């Protein structure tokens, strides 16, 4: 009786540890940031995208998905905006340049 009880606890413990390892290694971290940008290009393929340059680092161009067509239509090339961008990553410390699934969450006109 005691032997079955110990074996059951060991099996449950192994399952719990396995699930913990699985979920910790396959988790995505969600990030967001607010930045000033200048829209450099608008792209319309299967989805809507904009490419922008961050005001602080003018040489870096980043492509972001825009979920709302009305928002995409209102954005103008060479105009400055204050935006909220979200993205996912496998690493907790990933910055926007190395993120995946970049999405424009909010936008406000500067100037």
Image: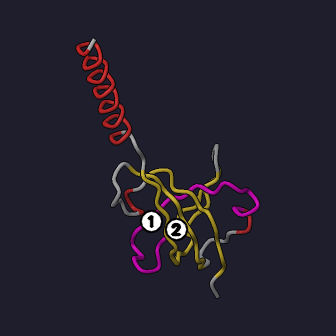
Please identify the residue farthest to the right as the structure is shown.
Answer: 70
Query: Which residue is labeled 2 in the image?
Result: 52
Q: Position of residue 62 (x, y in %)?
A: 47, 62
Q: Is residue 111 magenta?
A: no
Q: Which mark is residue 61?
A: 1
Could you tell whether 88 is left or right of 90 in the image? Answer: right
**Residue under the point 45% across and 65% down:** 61
Q: Is residue 105 above or below residue 107?
A: above
Please identify the residue farthest to the front as the structure is shown.
Answer: 1
Q: Is residue 88 above or below residue 81?
A: above
Point out the stretch of residues depicted in magenta.
52-72
Quadrant for the C terminus in the image:
bottom right
Could you tell whether 70 is left or right of 45 in the image? Answer: right
Q: Position of residue 97 (x, y in %)?
A: 39, 61
Q: Is residue 69 above or below residue 55?
A: above
Whichever of callouts 2 and 1 sits on the residue coming sooner in the sequence is 2
> Judging from the image, what secondary structure is the residue with disc 1 in?
strand
Q: Nearer the viewer, residue 76 or 98?
A: 98
Residues marked 2 and 1 touching at CB (< 8 Å): yes
**Residue under the point 33% across and 25% down:** 12
Rendered image quadrant of residue 92: bottom left
Rendered image quadrant of residue 39: bottom right
Callout 1 crowding tier (Cα within 10 Å): few <14, some 14–19, many ≥20: some
Q: Is residue 64 magenta?
A: yes
Callout 2 crowding tier (Cα within 10 Å): few <14, some 14–19, many ≥20: many
């Amino acid at each position: 009786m005691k032997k079955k009880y110990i074996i059951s606890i060991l099996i449950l413990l192994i399952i719990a540890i396995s699930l913990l390892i699985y979920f910790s290694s396959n988790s995505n971290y969600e990030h967001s940031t607010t930045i000033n940008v200048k829209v450099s290009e608008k792209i319309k393929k299967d989805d809507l995208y904009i490419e922008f340059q961050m005001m602080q680092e003018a040489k870096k161009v980043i492509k972001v998905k825009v979920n709302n067509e009305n928002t995409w239509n209102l954005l103008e090339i060479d105009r400055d905006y204050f935006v909220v961008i979200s993205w996912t990553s496998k690493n907790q410390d990933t910055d926007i340049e190395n993120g995946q699934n970049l999405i424009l969450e909010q936008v406000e006109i500067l100037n």
